[in-house]
Image (tube, rainbow, N blue to C red):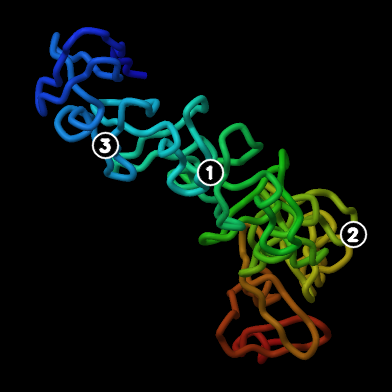
Amino acid sequence: PLSYLTSTMTERFDCYYCRDNLQGKKYVKKDEKPICPKCFEKTCANTCAECKRPIGVDAKELHHKNRYWHESCFRCAKCYKGLASEPFNARDDGKIMCGKCGAIQDGNRCQGCYKVVLPGTQNVEYKNKVWHEDCFKCFECKQPIRTKSFLTKGDDIYCTSCHDTKFAKKCFHCKKPISSGGLSYQDHPWHSECFVCHTCRKSLADTRFTSHENNVYCVDCFKTDVAKKCHGCKNPITGFGHGTNVVNYEGYSWHEYCFNCKKCSLTLANKRFVIKADNIYCPDCAKKV
């Protein structure tokens, strides 16, 4: 507050401006010059930044950064609360606001409810955006995330459970979401723990395997339980290793390297042959036998 010296005099004493006799009257002394209250308001008083009227001798004056107010005019521009003895914010546009209204005007707005997140309240910050703690919810189940893990899809937030249910690939075997890891076979995703031999249930990840009628088998189980037996050597036809090609004829199968003439051992794959008593012959040897 700016104070001015006021006094009364019993001797002849005139106002510096209007020369009115100040004897026995109130006056203001400024720069060693006596001034009557009326002239003070006209020529010397500061102008209130709010009401634009002079701040007279009897008014209490408040000032901040070269601006002056009547005590009653120094109030929040939004809620009109008096700020003479309260914390306040001085905005760049010249408005004075209480702490709460200033936070509402300038503070971050919640991405969920679009209300201001007041300083000191529980909130969540993510990618330069802010939410009230209770507004940071899963887009699918609408439950607050709080301290749980979450994933995003575009601008939407999901708890891990809803994200897996809605977006994660489903295991071809158990039909449940694959949240991490897994493998792909024949354009189908699998959990690693679900990709096992149909017979012995041994894991097939990182090992050799084959499939039959939509089931997968390890090499040993495929040989024992599934593979056809070669009509020549009587061993399983697995498709692995040497001689992966197979010859089929009238319900019988042979390894390609076993499909030879019984007499001259000429390979007969993709050639004319004769079968006699479960043996195969080239045409020339067939004539001889």
* Residue 111 visible within the image: yes
Q: Distance between the residues labelled 1 and 2?
A: 49 Å
Is 244 on the left or on the right of 27, as rendered? right
Camera-side mark, 3 or 2: 3
Give SS at disc 2.
Answer: loop
Foreground pick, 115 / 48: 48
* Image quadrant assignment for residue 23: top left
Instruction: Please tell me which of labels 3 and 2 falls first in the chain.
Output: 3
User: In the displayed structure, does residue 265 sit left or right of residue 1?
Assistant: right
From the image, tell me which residue sits under label 1.
126
Say which residue label 3 marks.
54
- Res. 254 image quadrant: bottom right
For disc 1, the neighbor class at 10 Å (few under 14, some 14 to 19, many from 20) is few
Pointer 2: what residue?
199
Q: Is residue 98 left or right of residue 193?
A: left
Residue in the image at 66% along x and 48% along y: 150
For the C terminus, the quadrant is bottom right
Disc 3 versus disc 1: nearer the observer = 3
Describe residue 65's horizontal placement relative to residue 118 as left or right. Answer: left
User: Earlier along the polypeptide chain: callout 3 or callout 1?
Assistant: 3
Q: Is residue 186 above or below residue 89?
A: below
**Separation (CA) of disc 3 from disc 2:** 99 Å
What type is the residue that disc 1 sits on?
A: Tyr
Along the viewing direction, whichever of 221 and 10 lies nearer the viewer? 10
**Circle 1 — which element?**
strand
Q: Name the residue rendered at 57%, 44% in the picture.
A: 117
